[in-house]
Amino acid sequence: RRLIPIFAALIFWLIGITLQIFKPLDKSADIFFIFCQTSCLFLTSGAISSMGPSWVFGLFNILIWFIGPITVHFHLYFPQSKPLRYPIILLRFFYLVAIIGSIPYLIFGLPTVRFFPWYPWLITANRLFLSTNLLIVVYLLFHDYRFASTPGVRGKIRIVVLGGILGAIPLVALTILPDGLLLQPLIPYPYAFLFVALVPLTYGYAIFRHRLIEIDKHINRGVTYILIYSLLGGFYFVLYYGFHSVLPPNFGKEPLLNTFLVLLLATAFVPMYRVVQRFVDTLFYG
């Protein structure tokens, strides 16, 4: 039961880190990384809040306020950007509400806040606010699917829409809303997070498979640099060992030898880079 949120958090962390390694200069890629890492921290703090120190449970409650606006923020740019004015104003309002909702935890601390008479109302407002944000995410996904920028995009974002709906609707309808209104979720949070794990899996698949964020050329470049520096490092050690085997022992310690090797590798860098880049392009594009 306790490992299920950790497993979901691991999926968010891995997908976010993988995209961050090869990310392009794309705003949606940066927000996706923040969304994944915040979700990872949210799930992890929730999993250990019942057995850890009180500040962890306080962090979990603060993240419940912020995870909704961050999710809405991400979906304003993914799977396609929405150049609309009013959603940005609404997003700023959501962040303001999240800051106001977090203030009691920051000022009084969780042990004190839990004894205030209005604490149950704060929890209810928290859950309703999160549900509202997730339902807005579902609307944004439907909007992207219905008003696709090009005919081919609609087919690509179908898997994103499906993953987002499967992650949001069961969590809202069967866990968050019953917990906020009745203080008793129908499906416990750890099991509901299994649905949440579908979000990074489907989003990551769509990003890499359908290139919703153009990362293929950045992966191509990353692979090229990894190969070229690995080859240069290997050549350096082979040449260094060869010179040490032929030259007198004292000569091998002179700076002249290292200077010569560095200049030799610098000269070989450009032609070697062209050969490796051509090889990688052939593997990527045929």
Image: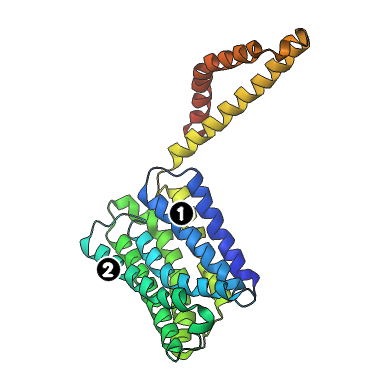
Query: Mark 1 near mark 2, Cβ–Cβ under 8 Å?
Result: no
Residue 104 falls left or right of residue 229: left
Q: Position of residue 250 (x, y in %)?
A: 76, 10
From where the camera sits, is residue 197 visible?
A: no
* Label 1 packing within 10 angstroms: few (<14), some (14-19), many (20+): many
Quadrant placement of the N terminus: bottom right
At 61% across and 28% down in the image, what residue appears?
Answer: 230
Q: Which secondary structure, mark 2?
A: helix
Q: Which residue is mark 2?
A: 90
Furthest-top residue in this view: 247
* Side of 146 relative to 260 (left or right): left
**Which one is earlier in the sequence, the residue at label 1 or at label 2?**
1
Disc on res. 118: none
The residue at which mark 1 appears reads as 33
Residue 196 position in % (x across, y down): 51, 68
The outermost residue toward the front is 107
The kind of residue tagged 1 is: Phe
Residue 272 locus on image (x, y percent) = 54, 19
21 up-or-down from 178: above or below:
above
- Neighbor class of circle 2 (other Cα within 10 Å; few <14, some 14-19, many 20+) is few
Q: Of helix, strand and loop, which one carries label 1?
A: helix
Direction from residue 265 to residue 126 in the image, left or right: left
Could you tell me how many numbered marks the image carries? 2
Q: Amino acid at mark 2?
A: Leu
Residue 96 found in image quarter: bottom left
Q: Residue at x 27, y 57 (%)?
A: 82
Q: Residue at x 44, y 76 (%)?
A: 107
Q: Position of residue 183 (x, y in %)?
A: 49, 88
| 217 or 40: nearer the viewer | 40
Indicate the colouring scheme: rainbow
* Residue at the farthest left position: 85
User: How far separated are the C-alphas under marks 1 and 2?
Assistant: 22 Å
